[in-house]
Image (cartoon, rainbow, N blue to C red):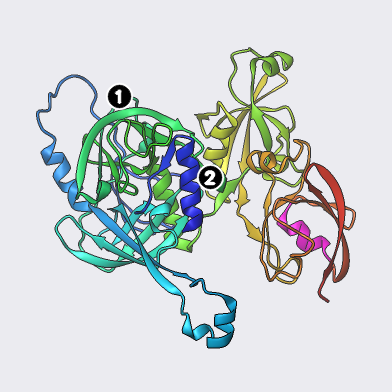
Amino acid sequence: MQISKLVSFILASLGIAVLPACAAEKPDADSAGSIVSAKHPVALKMDTSPLAAGPNARATSYADVIEPVQAAVVSVYSSKTTKQRVQVPDIFRQFYGNGAFPDRESTERGLGSGVIVSKDGYILTNNHVVAEADSLRVTLNDGREFDAKVIGTDPKTDVAVIKVEAVNLPILTLSDSDKLRVGDIVFAVGNPLGVGQTVTMGIISATGRQVGILAEQGGYESFIQTDAAINQGNSGGALVDAQGRLVGVNSAILSGRGGTGNIGIGFAIPVNLASSVLASLVDTGSVSRGYLGITGETLTPDLAEALAIPKDQKGVIVTNLPKDSPAAKAGLARSDVITSIDGKAINTMQDLRFLIAAKLPGSTVEVRLLRDDKERTIRVNLGTLDTAVADQETLRGVKLEPLTDENRQRVGAPRDLDGLVITDVADDSPFASRLSAGMVIVAINRQQVNSIEDTQRLLRPGMNLVVIFARGQFGHVAITVGK
C-alpha cells in the first residue's frame, strides 16, 4: 500500500489524481440483445444503436432513466491488513526473544464503486479499487450486501472484474462507446467520499484522451473525458448516457496542482475496452493483446514532404520491424505509412498501439498504408503481445517483453535496436546477479533475439554469451543454464 500512496502523491504533485480505493474485437450483434460467446463468456446486455439526434424531445427529468441505473451500481469496500515491526533495541529482542514484541497489525480500508453487468454477479470496477485488498464487500443500492472475490485485474487498463454469488441481479445495458460524440449528455453514478450513492450530470467533453495516468504500467489510454462531477469513491462507477446505457467506467480525475477535488475534468474507461478486458479475464484469467510487431512514429509534415506525400497526411510511419514479426511476414516494410486499420483512421502511434492491443491475438486486421505514394491494403494475422516468462528450464524467473515505442523510450534504446526488454527478475532467479530489469537482450550466442521463442531456441545447457544493452551501452554477460 505504501507504493500506491507514493504513486498517488507523485500524480497529485503533477495535478493528476487517480481516484483511490479509500483489446479485443467487438462481437457481432444486433443493435440490442445479449451476447454469449468465446469472446464474451459473460452474458452482457448490449444496445449499440446511436442516441436519437435532433431537438425533438425536451427532457424535464431523467429520473426514469436513472432509477434502474442506480440499482445496478454498487459500493465496493476493501480492506487490507498490514503488519509493522515494533521498534525496540536489538538487545531487548536478544534477551526476551522476538515473541515478546509481536508485529503491530493495522487495517487499511478503501472505498470505490462498481457496475453489475451480468445477472449472475459479475461486476466491472477499477484495478486500483481492488489492488492489494485482502477482502472485498459489495453493497447494492437496495441495502443488500455480499462478499466479493476478484476474478482478474488488468493494471494496463485499470480494469478489474469481481464477482458476488447471487442471481437475478439488476444489470446495466452496454452501449457502443465508439459512437460517443462530444456534447452527448452523460451521468456519473457512484459513491463519492462515502456519502452514499450519488448521480451527477454533464456532457462528453472529449474522447480518446491520453493523459499519462497509466504510463508507469505501460498502459493503454483512450479515456472518455467528462465534466460530470467525479470524486474519490466514484472509481469503478458507471458513466451512462441519456438512455441509461453504460458508456464508460469512471477511473480518474484531473485536479489543480496539489488538489484532489473535482474541477470538472474526469476520465472514464470506454465500455468497449472494459467489456473486452472483462471477457478475457473471465475466460482465461488474464488479458491477451494483439501484436503487430512494428516500431513507428507519428507522421509529421516534414516526414510527409520527404516521402513526397501531402503535408497534411495523417498516419504512422514504420521505422523498424523484426523480420519474424506479424507485420513483416504479411509484407509491411520500413517507411510504409499506416493510415487506417480495419477502417479506423490512424493519426498517431498511440492510436495504432491502442487499437492493435484491443484486438484478439490470431485475429486478422486490414491495414491501409501508403508506399511510394500509392495506397495499398495488407491483411495481417496478429500475434500475441504478452509479457512472458521465459521457459522455466532456460531463463527461470526472468520476465521479458518485445521492444515497443513506450518501453524503448523508458530504457533509452535506439529506434533501430531489436531485442527483448527485461521487465522483472525474481529475487530467487538463478540469473538475478547477472540480469536486471531495464536491460535489453539483443543477442544470444551471436544470434539476434527478437522473440521469447528465440531465447528458448538459442539458449543451451551450460555457458551462454548474451549481448545486452543497458544505460546507453552494449555489453556482454555470461550466464549458465542448468544441464
Give, as a single range, the part of the protein colored magenta: 451-459
| In the depicted structure, whether residue 236 falls above or below residue 258 | below
x 69%, y 15%: residue: 302
Residue 271 located within the stretch drawn in magenta: no
Image label count? 2
Q: Label 1 crowding class (10 Å Cα cut-off): few <14, some 14-19, many 20+?
A: few
Q: Amino acid at mark 2?
A: Gly
Asked if one can make out residue 148 in the rendered structure from this viewpoint, the answer is: yes
Query: Are dots 1 and 2 in contact, CB under 8 Å?
Result: no
Indicate the position of residue 478 as horizontal and vertical percent values: 87, 62
Indicate the position of residue 415 as horizontal and vertical percent values: 75, 35
Specify whether 165 is left or right of 298: left
Question: Which secondary structure class fits the magenta region best?
Answer: helix
Residue 183 is labelled as 1
| In the depicted structure, whether residue 349 falls above or below residue 364 | above
Which residue position is annotated with label 2?
Answer: 219
| In the depicted structure, whether residue 7 falls above or below residue 210 | below
x 75%, y 51%: residue: 439
| In the depicted structure, whether residue 18 falls above or below residue 127 | above
